[in-house]
Image (spheres, helix red, strand yellow):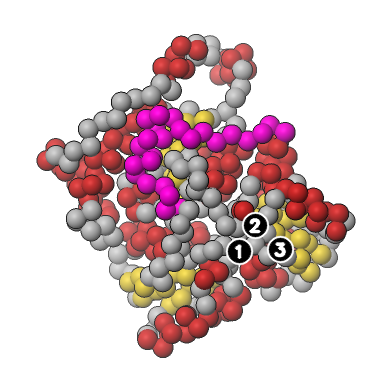
Amino acid sequence: MALAGEIEAKTGQAAEKPDSVAKKYAPIEKPNLEYTPEVAEEMAPLYEKVKHVIPPIEWPFFAPYIKAINELKKERNAVILAHNYQTPEIFHCVSDIAGDSLQLAKDAAKVDADVIVQCGVHFMAETSKLLNPEKTVLIPDAKAGCSLAESITGADVRMLREKFPGVPIVTYVNTSADVKAESDICCTSSNAVQVVESFDSDTVLCIPDEYLAQNIAKQTKKKILTWKGHCEVHERFTAEELRRYREDDPNIVIIAHPECPPDVVEEADFSGSTSGMINWVQDNQPKKVVMVTECSMSDNVAVANPNVEFVRPCNLCPHMKRITLQNILDSLLYMKDEVTVDPAVAGKARLAVERMINLGN
């Protein structure tokens, strides 16, 4: 966090006094969560938006939490970031910024808020902190991890440097800050080929997602070295499963995330990043589509595309589902759990992310 004098120099205003900061972040008493006729009426416009993906029986439970969270955001001067894999009541009803992990962090930097509540997994909260170092970043459940991010450590990257001296290391944003700090540059699933091609070297390490790296290798002449990290959601899909969908309906359209195994991507009609898949559906408006990715994303895309029928191969991310309306509310009430990054790590990790962002610009 910046010192008071630094804040004053940057804003031209005196920094808040310690007692006012303490008051701003003091615990707040839990509000009434009863579903009253007044709550029903106030929340009706939001339910109209999501009614074809949230059953009526569930709404009386969700509505009081949604109302309380949206009121608390104003009191805390907080912004809620929601990843595409969050459930619809979070993604569409309480989030201020929704999207993929990197876009969330970039957009948060443009918002005049003191607090970021990251509705996603832990590496996403770290990335938000890297790009917004002076803001308080909270995650509603500190145990919301990621199988892919946990497949590699900073020590592993240092070992790869020794084993492959001079080979550039491109690291997927789905990694810890410690891993980013040991890398040359980050990438996303949408810009990975561009990032790989930006190096003069004929060999590039692309870590840690093995399947993403294998799918990238098919789009470049460079030799791609991989690491055996996998997303536990996407690795469960099989080409045979997709062929069965086609047998049931030859007109069905299949789109897949590049974290899926290469034979799954080969079987699909289109493969793209989270944002790429969403844009493809919006632009093409297929009659019936299978989105080969985390299940909640289909629900969220369905809200904006009511004329598209979504067949849901329901692989849920257990880590994303740790985030709920209940712990989002608690996060704002009690200002927990705060995500911090060691300053010695943060500077190098931020540089790897900013190199990618600058490359895109």
Give the class, few, some or many, for how many residues have Cα within 10 Å of label 1's Cα (few <14, many ≥20): many
Where's residue 226, x and y in %? 73, 65
Q: Is residue 158 above or below residue 301?
A: above
Q: Quarter of the image holding residue 67?
A: top left
Residue bearing the label numbered 1 = 230
- Please tell me which of labels 3 and 2 falls first in the chain: 2
Q: Amino acid at mark 1?
A: His
Residue bearing the label numbered 2 = 151
Q: Amino acid at mark 3?
A: Trp
Q: Compute the Cα span from label 3 to label 2.
A: 9 Å
Q: Compute the Cα span from label 1 to label 2.
A: 8 Å
Which span of residues is magenta-colored?
Answer: 320-344
Q: Quarter of the image holding residue 316?
A: bottom left
Residue 244 appears in the figure: yes
- Please tell me which of labels 1 and 2 falls first in the chain: 2
- The chief SS type of the magenta part is helix
In the image, 146: left or right of 170? left
Give the class, few, some or many, for how many residues have Cα within 10 Å of label 3's Cα (few <14, many ≥20): some
Q: Are marks 3 and 2 in contact (CB under 8 Å)?
A: yes
Q: Foreground residue, 337 or 199?
A: 337
Q: Judging from the image, what secondary structure is the residue with disc 2 in?
A: helix
Give the class, few, some or many, for how many residues have Cα within 10 Å of label 2's Cα (few <14, many ≥20): some
Where's residue 169, x and y in %? 76, 55
Which residue is pictured at 48% across the width and 66% down the height? 293
Any magenta on residue 102? no
Which residue is pictured at 29% across the width and 41% down the height? 66
Any magenta on residue 343? yes
Q: Are marks 1 and 2 in contact (CB under 8 Å)?
A: yes
Where's residue 250, x and y in %? 40, 87
Where's residue 47, x and y in %? 23, 50
Q: Amino acid at mark 2?
A: Ser
Residue bearing the label numbered 3 = 227
